[in-house]
Image (cartoon, rainbow, N blue to C red):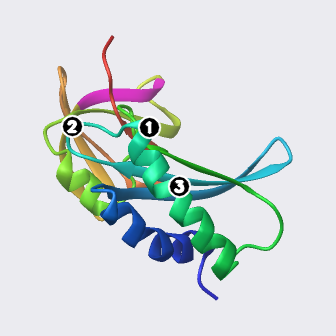
Amino acid sequence: MAKITDLVSDLAAPFVEAAGCSLWDVEYVREAGEWFLRVYIDKEGGVSIDDCEAVSRPLSDALDQADPIEGSYVLEVSSAGADRPLKKPEHFEKFLGAEVEVRLYRAMEGRKDHVGVLKGYDNGDVTIETAAGPQTFSKKDVAQVRLYVRF
């Protein structure tokens, strides 16, 4: 049986593309006793509330018809965000040269969070350039990689 997120990705893709956007990610998570189906979209120049609505309405109808999820859930369609997580190889490829934050499962060099310019991605291993030089983190050590936003 296919994962719910894969099924929803396939179902959502035509609606996302029709809205002039690209599908960034799909999450199906339980929070505070409720299930949430989150569809993250992206668009050159940014995602508007109208873009989210243009995807949400027809996707909701398609989900009702296909009924791939047992039980109730909350559907959310939103922008991937400025500090979006990078999960897929194409995400890393798109943002080579961008500043990222690498969050580790356990501390290395006294800390879990490392910020630098994304220089490479190889089968889950992440290389960033920092003031101290290049650092490569093994896939098994990396909990999350996000775009880093300075305020």
Q: Is residue 90 at least partly visible in the picture?
A: yes
Tag in front: 3 or 2: 3
Q: What residue type is labelled 3?
A: Ser
Does the magenta portion include 115? Answer: yes
Q: Give residue 60's position: percent from left, percent from top.
A: 61, 63
Q: In this view, does 110 lie to the left or right of 36?
A: left
Which residue is identified by label 1?
Answer: 49
Label 2 residue SS: loop
Q: Is residue 96 left or right of residue 81?
A: left
Label 1 residue SS: helix
Disc with the residue nearer the chain's start (3 vs 1): 1
Determine the residue positioned at 32% across, 23% down.
149
Q: Give the range drawn in magenta.
A: 111-116
Query: In the displayed structure, would residue 53 be above or below residue 128?
Result: below
Determine the residue positioned at 22% across, 38% down.
128
User: Residue 135 sits in which quadrant?
Assistant: top left
Q: What residue type is labelled 2?
A: Gly
Disc with the residue nearer the chain's start (3 vs 2): 2
Q: Give the spatial CA distance, label 3 vs label 1.
A: 10 Å
Determine the residue positioned at 38% across, 32% down.
83
Q: How crowded is mark 2: few (under 14 residues within 10 Å), some or many (20 or more)?
A: few
Query: In the displayed structure, would residue 58 be above or below residue 65?
Result: above
Q: Residues within 10 Å of mark 1 (few under 14, many from 20)?
A: few
Query: In the displayed structure, would residue 2 be above or below residue 104?
Result: below
- Locate the N terminus by quadrant: bottom right
Along the viewing direction, whichever of 84 and 123 lies nearer the viewer:
84
Along the viewing direction, whichever of 14 and 89 lies nearer the viewer:
14
Which residue is identified by label 3?
Answer: 56
Which residue is identified by label 2?
Answer: 45
